[in-house]
Amino acid sequence: MKKIIYNKFDKTKIPALPRAVFEGRIVVIISESEAEKAVDYLLSQPILGIDTETRPSFRKGRANQVALLQVSTRDICFLFRLNMIGLSATIKRLLEDNYVPKIGLSLHDDLMMLGRREDFNHGYFIDLQHKVKDVGVEDMSLQKLYANFFGQRLSKRERLSNWEADILTDKQKVYAATDAWACIMLYEELLRLEQTGDYELIKVVEDVQADTITEG
C-alpha cells in the first residue's frame, strides 16, 4: 500500500497524534575541548540533522543571540551551548564542512543567526523546505511535515523556554535533540519516496471546505 501524504496537513489533527521523541544519547557541549571531540565524530558520519535555539525576547525591537546549536546523527545528538563557548573555530569547521550533508529546516534563518555570532562560510546544507516541494508538499513547518510523513507529533512546549539557563532541563534537551534528529528522518523518507514512487499525494481543496480533499 502506498503512503498517503498531503500537500497541506490539517494542523487540527496534530494534537491527537502520538508523540515522536529522540531516544538516542544526548551530549551537552560546554567547552572547546569537548567541541573538538564532538566535531571530529560528527564529521565522520554520513549525514547530520541540524537546528538552533534562541532565548525568546519579549521586548519589542530586542533579539537575543542564538544560544544553542544542536547537531544529530541517527542515534546521538550534541548540544553546543553557544552562549557559553561562542562560535569557536572548531564549530566553524563543522559549519564550513563541504562533505557531510547537514539537513535542516528554514536554514536561511538559522545560518543568519549563527553568522551574527561569527562570520563563516556556509558548508554543505540541505533545506527541507526546498526538498519537500519535489513531492508536492507545500507545508513549511517541521511539526506539520513530521505529522504528514510519519503520523507523529513533535512537541513544541519547550520552544519559548530559557535557552541561556545555567543548566538545560531534560525536557529542553529532548526537545532540541528531537528537532535535529527529525530532520534526518524526514530527509531519508523523502529520498525513499522519490526513489520508489511509493506514495500518493492528496491535494487539499481549500476554497471549498477545510476538510474537503481531492486526490491528485
Image: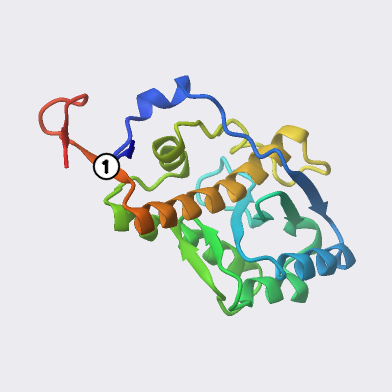
Q: Between residues 167 and 95, which one lies in front from this camera angle?
A: 95
Q: Residue at x 59, y 56 (%)?
A: 49
Residue 32 in percent (x, y) is at: 85, 67
Residue 111 as seen in the image, left or right of residue 150: right
Q: Amino acid at mark 1?
A: Glu
Residue 30 in percent (x, y) is at: 84, 56
Residue 150 as seen in the image, left or right of residue 134: right
- Rendering colour mode: rainbow
Give the residue pinned by disc 1.
200
Residue situated furthest right in the rendering: 33
Residue situated furthest front in the rendering: 1
Which quadrant, please, contains the N terminus? top left
Q: Residue at x 29, y 48 (%)?
A: 138
Q: Residue at x 59, y 54 (%)?
A: 51
Residue 134 as seen in the image, left or right of residue 67: left
Q: How many marks?
A: 1
Q: Between residues 194 and 50, which one lies in front from this camera angle?
A: 194
As drawn, 49 above or below 98:
above
Q: Between residues 186 and 91, which one lies in front from this camera angle?
A: 186
Q: Estimate how packed mark 1 is, as few (under 14), some (14 to 19) or many (20 or more) residues with alpha carbons within 10 Å.
A: some
The image quarter containing residue 122 is: bottom right
